[in-house]
Image (spheres, rainbow, N blue to C red):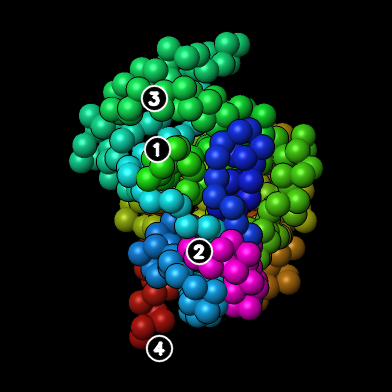
Amino acid sequence: MNLHEFQAKRLFAEHGIPIPRGEVAYTPEEAREVTRILGGKAVVKAQVLTGGRGKAGGVKVAQSPDEAQANAEAILGMQIKGLTVNKVLVDELAPGIRQELYLSALIDRGQRQPMIMASAAGGMDIEEVADKTPEKIHIVHIDPTLGVRSYQTNYLAKNMGLPRELWGDFNKIVSGLYDCFKSNDASLTEINPLIITGEGKLMALDGKMSIDDNALSRHPRLAEMRDLEEEPPAEAEARQAGLTFIQLDGNIGCMVNGAGLAMATMDIIKLYGGSPANFLDIGGGARADQVATALRLILSDPKVEAVLFNIFGGITRGDEVARGILAALEQIDTPVPMVVRLAGTNAKEGLELLAEADMMTAATLSEAAQKAVAAAKAARESGRAS
């Protein structure tokens, strides 16, 4: 679950990280009033769960309350990467920016440890920095039993070229960011930029935070921060049904049980010239009604030209999956071709049910992927012909 900038920065502040004063506004008039309270000058920032807000015109500086109102009028309602801006964060202007830095806490899955990543090249996408100037990225790994140590933050500060007088404050911010990361079961806490102000102080101007969905049961306060308006309707319905669903831009819908198998299915579709329309993991022990819900979600995407089912029965029973597919097709009248590959528990019974319904089946994943790609191509050509 991703948090908005204002939510992330408020959590940062709870751990001693300095942030600008600011409030969320939902109308231009509210933005004007917040700017007046902040002293008459502010920056108005679109609050959407995506990057590139500044490049899209979603971040504007206001030198007066009237200008803040006009900026909010321009930003509210705009589309940024397909998301509608419904609120803005009105922050006080920083007292000058002497330098922009980058700082984050995240998991290094290769090392199986948390790590702190820092760079003097703040204000830029860290992927761009890593690609063009990797020597500007500095990393330390954190032993969870010890936490952040001062020698580690000193190492980062020295390699980033921070003035010596800021090393103590930098240590507090790094420690606070890691504590925020750990205590909230985050997968990422990021400050970009962390600035050195004109007064020689450190301040987090922006914030990003991603929470591990599997830990939300331990954090009811964080669960309440989920912005349902920003969540694609299909993904929200999938989450409520206990499914893992992410919509993509391809043309072949995928229904698979198991995240690793789902990734392999997407890869093999690409191998044979297709493009996956989604990632969908129905998990272990999926019931017929969950399968029916999953199929409805896949078919709700108008780009889908074929559907590939790849089910390896363990806890999940092949006959239950087959019944779910047939139940969904009773509710949805669709011309979209479908290919089913079933293996494992009760696969024989499932295949018999599908055969009675004249559904296309395959013995292997390779065969299923090739059939799905061919079916999508035939459907596309048929559509053009008509």
Disc number lying in front (2 or 4): 2
Give the label, 1 or 4, closer to the camera.
Answer: 1
- Identify which residue, 251 or 208, lies in the foreground: 208
Question: How far separated are the C-alphas under marks 2 and 4?
Answer: 56 Å
Q: Position of residue 163 (x, y in %)?
A: 33, 27
Q: Are marks 3 and 1 in contact (CB under 8 Å)?
A: yes
The residue carrying mark 4 is 386
* Residue on which the image places disc 3: 165
Q: Which label number is shown at residue 200?
A: 1
- Tell me where residue 373 appears, x and y as whole percent: 39, 59
Name the amino acid type tagged 4. Answer: Ser
Viewer-proximal residue, 331 or 73? 73
Q: Residue at x 66, y 58 (%)?
A: 227
Instruction: Give the label, 2 or 1, closer to the camera.
Output: 1
State which quarter of the image contains the C terminus: bottom left
Eye-nearest disc, 3 or 4: 3
Q: Residue furthest bottom?
A: 386
> How far apart, in angstroms, are the residues tagged by discs 1 and 4?
68 Å
Tag 2–tag 4 contact (CB < 8 Å)? no
Residue placed most toward the observer, 20 or 249: 20
Of label 3 and label 2, which has the lower sequence position? 2
Q: Earlier in the sequence, mark 1 or mark 4?
A: 1
